Amino acid sequence: MTRPGWYSQPYPPEGASAAEGIRNQLGRPELDLLTILVRESAQNSWDARLADPSGPVDFRLALSTVSPAHAPAWRDLLIETAPVGRDSFPLRDVLRQGAVRLLTISDRGTRGLGGPTRADNAVGPERDFVSFIRNIGEPRDTALGGGTYGFGKGIFYLLSRPGTILVHSRCAVPGGRETRLIGCTLWRSYVDTRGPEPRRYTGRHWWGDTTGDVVEPLVGEAAEDIAHRLGLQSFAEHETGTTIVVIDPSLDEMAPREAADYLAETIVWHLWPKMIGQDGQAPAMRFAVACDGVEHPVPNPRELDPIGMFVAAYERMTSSDGSELHCKSPKRFLGRLGLVKRILPGLEPTRASRMVGLETLVHHVALMRPAELVVSYHPGPKPPSENQGYAGVFRADVTMDDVYARAEPPTHDAWHPQSLERPESTFVQTTFRRIGEAVDGLFALSGVSRGGSAGIALGAASRMLSGLVGGAWGVGGAIAVEKPGSTAVPKRGVVVRESEEGSETTGAAAGGNLHMLQTGDHSSASWAQVGAEAESGDYLLAPPGGHNGTEAPQRRPRVRLVGDPYYDTRGNTDVLVQDFRLPVPGRQRVSIDLAVTLPGGGARETDPPAGAAMPTLLGWENDAGTLCTTETCDMDGGEAVWRALVRPAPDTMTEIDIRVQAVRNP
């Protein structure tokens, strides 16, 4: 019977990839290694599902220790012929120490690692073995699969302290099924000086049948016999699948039982779409986690807060209540979206929820491709109250799968439009914009300009978390206007404009569609307020008393909001900040009108109930950080950016109207 041994890859004359380079291809992901392992291994299992399955894919994670009965076989089979050197091959020391921990990842109901075992022979469609064991960066061969370029398999080596895994697989071959067993180490390149001449090695090692010109896996009875001696679970007669054993896994300083619970919850956060049955059918995958022979139940996603909200959003997305997202230029159907909102208490964050960016407030949309594996939880605008939350699910259309796949990093946990060329980057950017628009509509947070001001309803949250909605510039407050080119002389405190026929009419005579908000004396001038129905770009300031031939009409002052409002702090005070400019030159005076709107309503409240808080103006801040704390503030128009600082009222939407008027020299 073939006895396995180790083979270390030397650098060939034409060069090869060093182990360090392959290990670094995952980059520096934000997720921890255990989370990436769950995502990547489950994704691989899903992509390897049988074409005609008789049941769901079974996916299992098990933490264990090599038993005393099997420990001698581990040392005997894996240390003999192993490379020498702690720095170049640490597995030797790991096996010689005390108990050896293992993390086993197994799937059943999958096709196993089939196809040719040599990379130079893998010219057909079946190349699972060489894609996982030999090659790096092969494009995916599964239509609408979760993986893209196979870099994610590096997580198995990164999680192993000595960079070593065993791969035990059963696959279909011509004439039946075949069991395969091979070991792989990915550590670091080194130079061996023991020979007559120093020789460089890539740091890649394989353990298996070394009798040929290239190391091959143990197959058939030899593979089953060695697997049995090592204590690996055998395959049933007609069963196919793969078992990967990570030797001495890094558990991120968690105890094994704690790590098992974390893995069980992590499965739910990232794989819940595969755990829910649809249309009365069984779930697509079954999951199990164990530690030292004790099962650690994987929670039901419908019963785990807040995953249940995302399940409800998924069901809405797949129903007629879901919405379609489109890109208008260039035209393209992007996918479907489902949103749900609920009144819910603050969440108690867990390690697994923090890993995906959810703390105490749910305001996220789960992004997924047609494979229905969660890519990420995209944070949207925060809800108007800390007692409200929403969850959403966006699933890309099958025609867009390649676009979103190319936007993913090797860990498949984000969509980065900047990594794409146009128009593909436009599609991804538009996806995020359409999701934001849908969320605004969910809470009726879209801005509503009030008559004659540059104001916009800004969704503000409680003192701790605020939902914010961007604005747009509008008409400055307290001004008298006339249409460009008109010779009409406005009366004191009256808005004058031309009718379609060219005749002069006052606001009252124009059908009441101009709303008089304010008149009065400001220095020597009197000004009237244009209503919201007026077109903001069609008017200029006119001096009181009309034109006298020496004084030219002036441009009316405007407020132009800069960017979206945001939440910030000043000292120990939480503030709502809106940046703005006054684009028209000249001395101008700004003021503010604050009101609240209760979540889910539309009524504007300016008189609070007894004991209730109202938003208050803290002041006007310039670029230098100087604060003007008066209710009105005189400033020069131009390109300088000012900030309105507001202390919002808890559990309300804060409505802000920024008004501006010209200041006339006496």
Image (spheres, rainbow, N blue to C red):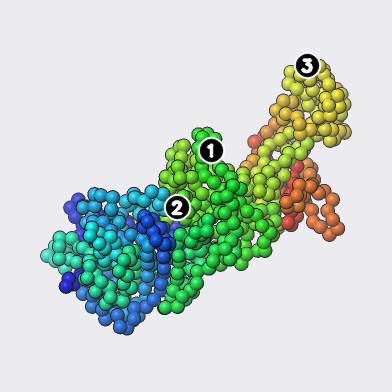
> Is 73 left, or right, of 589 in this rendering?
left
- Residue 327 numbered tag: 1
> Badge 3 is on which residue?
502
Residue type, numbered disc 3: Gly
- Return the disc, 3 or 1, that comes first in the chain's sequence: 1
**Which residue is drawn at the image coordinates 82% and 33% (left, top)?**
515
Observer-nearest of 501 and 613: 501
Question: Which x, y percent locates residue 394?
Answer: 54, 49
Res. 348 image quadrant: bottom right
- Return the disc, 3 or 2, that comes first in the chain's sequence: 2
Residue type, numbered disc 1: Cys
Sort mark 3 into few (<14), some (14-19) or many (20+) by Cα contacts within 10 Å.
few
Question: Which x, y percent locates residue 635?
Answer: 73, 38
Question: Which x, y percent locates residue 379?
Answer: 57, 53
Q: CA distance from mark 3 to mark 1?
A: 41 Å
Residue 424 visible within the image: yes
Q: Is residue 297 above or below residue 328?
A: below
Classify mark 1: helix, strand or loop.
strand
> Badge 2 is on which residue?
371
Q: Is residue 628 above or below residue 83?
A: above
Q: Is residue 116 above or below residue 512?
A: below
Q: Quarter of the image containing the N terminus?
A: bottom left
